[in-house]
């Protein structure tokens, strides 16, 4: 598994907490808008059309809104087609499957200097899925009459098998590195193998073979375990979390340069038994004191 190397060096602390005191805190419905989907840009001569989604991840069966804006030096109308496609990947087969078209919408945009009025198209890309731990990826594209394409995308998630949460510090420094924690809570009624963790800054689509979502790595900052754990056994017995027990994993977030003040993170936790959970978080540095800001 691609996140095994990261998981092998985590610092984990087990904490016993009554299960009744903690629920499934990772709410993709409320936290999905915190994770920004990438912006697609369509260049059409002297005009430009952008497409953004209102969230980067949502529950399976939910709805997403696409915001499309056209800009041109002189007012004009631009015709494009909005598409949403379910990426099927290999889907357990030997060859990659073609994507499934789930939405097609022709649009006529009013392009204006500085951006015309946005067109907002809200649509569902999936049906509710009862089985937790199921993820899918949808490409959302704008296509011009001459075939140019601008794309973005969204992940869907069917729900957690247990609880996982990303916890920033109570006070984030105005500059320099800081630490965060990933808290896993066994909210099931049976013992749970302490899961492996994959931490990233967003979703980049699906992997080639197993159709799992892969996580995009941060560009402006690095996230790494605080310290390596002792050498890993060749065939280690997984640490088991009792019902209500927690494990806490600490990471250091290090910006690559000054001025990085917004952070977006997503964690995916997976056990060897196939239980999975996901959480997202977005937070900002506080503004520096006024005497520091004016120096």
Image: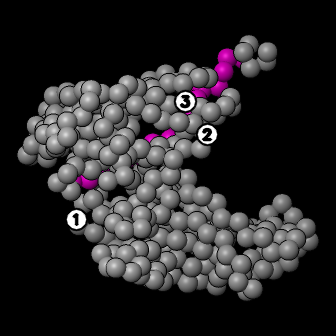
Please tell me whether mark 2 sits on a helix, a strand or a loop: loop
- Mark 3: few, some, or many residues within 10 Å (few <14, many ≥20)? some
Identify the residue at horizontal 32%, vertical 33% (top origin).
10
The answer, for residue 22, to whether it is visible in the render is no
Image coordinates for residue 255, horizontal then vertical, percent = 59, 31
Residue under the point 48% across and 56% down = 203
Q: Is residue 110 visible to the viewer in this orientation of the structure?
A: yes
The quadrant the C terminus occupies is: top right
Q: Secondary structure at mark 1?
A: loop
Q: Is 239 included in the stretch rendered in magenta?
A: no
Is 109 in front, or is 200? 200
| Farthest left residue in view | 190
Image-based side of 18 in relation to 88, left or right: left
- Return the mark for residue 220: 2
Q: Which residues are magenta?
A: 275-290
- Quarter of the image holding residue 234? top left
Numbered badge on residue 254: 3
Circle 2 residues within 10 Å: few <14, some 14–19, many ≥20:
some
Q: Earlier in the sequence, mark 3 or mark 2?
A: 2
The first of marks 1 and 2 along the sequence is 1
Callout 1: few (<14), some (14-19), or many (20+) C-alpha neighbours within 10 Å?
few
Q: Which is more N-terminal, label 3 or label 1?
A: 1
**Which residue: 61% across, 23% down?**
175
Picture coordinates of residue 261 (x, y %)?
A: 62, 33
Along the line of sight, the residue nearer the viewer: 64 or 270? 270
């Amino acid at each position: 598994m691609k996140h095994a190397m990261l998981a092998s060096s985590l610092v984990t602390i087990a904490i016993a907490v009554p299960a009744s005191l903690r629920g499934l805190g990772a709410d993709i419905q409320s936290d999905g808008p915190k994770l920004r989907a990438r912006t697609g840009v369509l260049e059409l001569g002297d005009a430009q059309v952008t497409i953004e989604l209102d969230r980067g991840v949502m529950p399976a069966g939910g709805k997403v809104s696409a915001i499309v804006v056209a800009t041109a030096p002189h007012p004009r109308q631009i015709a494009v087609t909005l598409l949403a496609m379910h990426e099927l990947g290999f889907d357990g087969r030997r060859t990659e499957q073609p994507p499934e078209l789930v939405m097609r919408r022709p649009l006529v945009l009013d392009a204006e200097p500085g951006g015309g009025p946005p067109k907002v198209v809200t649509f569902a890309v999936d049906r509710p899925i009862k089985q937790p731990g199921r993820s899918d990826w949808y490409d959302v594209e704008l296509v011009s009459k001459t075939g140019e394409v601008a794309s973005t995308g969204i992940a869907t998630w069917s729900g957690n098998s247990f609880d996982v949460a990303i916890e920033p510090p109570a006070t984030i420094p105005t500059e320099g590195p800081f630490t965060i924690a990933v808290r896993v809570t066994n909210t099931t009624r049976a013992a749970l193998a302490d899961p492996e963790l994959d931490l990233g800054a967003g979703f980049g689509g699906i992997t080639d073979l197993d159709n799992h979502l892969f996580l995009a790595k941060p560009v402006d900052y690095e996230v790494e375990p605080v310290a390596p754990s002792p050498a890993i056994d060749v065939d280690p017995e997984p640490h088991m979390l009792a019902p209500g027990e927690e494990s806490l994993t600490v990471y250091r977030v290090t910006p690559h340069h000054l001025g990085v003040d917004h952070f977006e993170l997503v964690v995916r936790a997976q056990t060897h038994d196939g239980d999975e959970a996901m959480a997202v978080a977005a937070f900002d540095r506080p503004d520096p004191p006024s005497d520091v800001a004016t120096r």
